[in-house]
Amino acid sequence: MHQTSDHRPLPFFVLTAILALLLSQPVVAQDDKAFALNPVTNFCSRWYQQSVVKNDVLYIDSGVQTWNGTSVKGPFYGISQSTRNICHSHNYIMNIPLNFTWDWKSNIIVNAVPKNDSNPNTGTLPPSLTRGHMFHGPAEDSAVYIYGGTTFMGNRSFPGYRQPDASTYPLWSYNLNSSGYQWQQYDLSLPWMPNHGAAAEAIDQNLGFYLNGQIDWGTETRTLNFSNTTAYRPLDGMLVIDLQNQTATNISTPGIGGGGPRVGGTMEYFASVGGMGVLVALGGMVNNTYLSGPNDDYNHGSLIAFDSVDVFDIDSYLQDTSSNGTWYRQNTTGDIPAPRIDFCTTSISAPDNSSHHIYLYGGIDPNKGQDINAGYDDVYVLSIPSFTWTPIFQNGASPRWGHNCHVAGKRQMVTVGGNITNTGICDWELKGVAFLDMSTATWGSVFLTNTSEFTVPKQVLPATGGTIDGSATVTEPSKGWTDQDLKKVRFRGTDTSTSNLRSATVSELYSNRVLYHKLERS
């Protein structure tokens, strides 16, 4: 977003060691007695958190934070610094109500709850990790689900530091409305707990998807002996997680592009495309040394360009769950954004499902080091099925990376946290959230409950050949299908009840211990 800055970004390897997250005021925050700083009242900046919107609530979990509003000083890599420069993950989960109109400059409500009570059945504390993913979970289940992540290892003398635990319980659920213990943990029988992967969710099918990712120094007890503490080890495959029965299957991804497992990218789900929906994976990084050694770092990787994306046909997997399903590669056209990692995406469809749109915001190029252009403050839209990129906001003065974004309300994109690439400078978004009107491409500080339904932005109409209400006439890429079999996937929906994953009608199928919900489609 806008906002000027005359400070140069730190090199990426330093930035990853000085991480941070988000939030703010009118606040209800319970103190963690072992944790002297409050993540809301002492908020400076925060990033690499987990977040999701569910049932008119924005949930924000952990992440790494810098602190403000106190004279407390403490060690950071052996240097005594003001609290503003102290970084560490925090042991709280926060929630922000989205059931009324508010402005983060005046009347936002942020509730922060410490994670200081152990599971009475296992004696395990809820995790406080970074670079994991928070899933919405089944619609009829009021809990949200947190998968994966890694312990921030940059400041192990911090009062809230917790030693990495075993990867036995990579999936946790949190139920804000529970009158008893609010956390539950699940053993998915997986060898590793990944982080920094790309995730998407088919809410209508109770399925989560987690693509590739990595393990690193902070993953668990077995990785504490990594000889290179800044290195990571990429992980192959994509997890299909049944969030209703808390089981998971790891499938191979030989058909995906990039030349190896990717980190720092994103993935989006469209319910009304194809027989059972599709996943679209985009961006990220593949390390050049992946084939020659087990450990990689971010300063020598190859960024995955946005001139193509990978599309996964979920139905191809559900028809035969002993298979790996089918990935398709499709080239894109238009004004293609520069390659990057740690951007955020969210997606929405035209009112009549005749076109589908992925909004991409911010990110960073770790290969640029201290270059002022390492971070990005821009918004691009990828329109499908034309697979055309359109910029709707460019050349902002406040680059941001390590943030999340979600559809909130009827047509707003809420951005959560993010590193603003300046050490010692607090996030000018004082509450750690901001809003983009996805129809008008207008930034603001107000969450609106009384706005109209989403319409396609006027800037994007050349990519759809339709109107703001849909009616897309562009039904295929201008340069043709990169994989001819992809054109067999039905991209134009006709059932508006599945738009934006709301009020879908489903029937149940069981296969390989996983419960699948098939949308009723015309």
Image: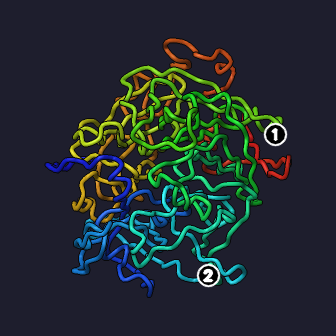
Q: Which residue is mark 1?
A: 321
In the picture provided, is 386 more to the left or to the right than 194?
left
Above or below, 109 against 320 in this view is below
Coordinates of residue 262 in the picture (x, y in percent) = 54, 38
- Which amino acid type is shown beneath numbered disc 1? Thr
For this rendering, which residue is in front, 341 or 231? 231
Coordinates of residue 512 in the picture (x, y in percent) = 85, 48
**Label 2 – label 1 distance at C-alpha:** 37 Å
Above or below, 341 against 36 in this view is above
Kindly state the secondary structure of the residue where label 2 is placed: loop
Kindly state the secondary structure of the residue where label 1 is placed: loop
In the picture provided, is 296 more to the left or to the right than 396?
right
Res. 357 visible in picture: no
Residue shown at 51% from the left, 19% from the top: 474
Residue shown at 67% from the left, 65% from the top: 169
Q: Which residue is mark 2?
A: 118
